[in-house]
Image: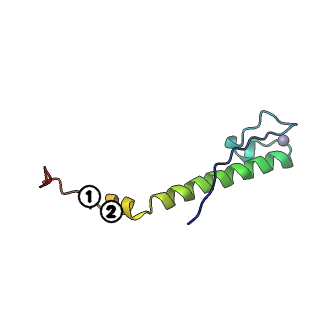
Amino acid sequence: MLKIGSIRFQARCNRHPMYNPEDGRGAIRGGCPKCELLHEIHLAHVKLVDLMRKTKNDTPKAAAAKAGASVDPRQTALF
Ligand SMILES: [Zn+2]
């Protein structure tokens, strides 16, 4: 089992406080190493969230729901 606690992280470049890593590498001015780091952290975060979503969607319950193995729609009541 993998357990990851919640992480809250905020950082900005002192020289380029308006740089938004979501704007991509092309928005980095003068090859600023701090902005590069912020962009790499952003990419790693996006990848981490994507991997976590894939793992969540890979549970047996989710797989059964995806395969349509849910309750028979013709069954209207439990006996
Ligand atoms: Zn910068």
> In screen coordinates, is 42 left or right of 62?
right
| 9 left or right of 48 in image | right
Contact (Cβ within 8 Å) of mark 2 with mark 1: yes
Give how far across and how far down residue 55 sits, in percent: 50, 61
Disc 1: which residue: 70
Structural distance between the alpha carbons of marks 2 and 1? 7 Å
In primary-sequence order, the first of circles 2 and 1 is: 2
Q: Position of residue 77 (x, y in %)?
A: 13, 50
Quadrant location of ligand 1? top right
- Neighbor class of circle 2 (other Cα within 10 Å; few <14, some 14-19, many 20+) is few
Task: Give the residue type that dot 1 points to.
Answer: Ser
Q: Is residue 67 above or below residue 30?
A: below
Q: Position of residue 79 (x, y in %)?
A: 11, 55
Q: Position of residue 64 (x, y in %)?
A: 33, 62
At label 1, counting other C-alpha atoms closer than 10 Å, the crowd grade (few under 14, some 14-19, many 20 or more) is: few
Query: What type is the residue that disc 2 sits on?
Result: Ala
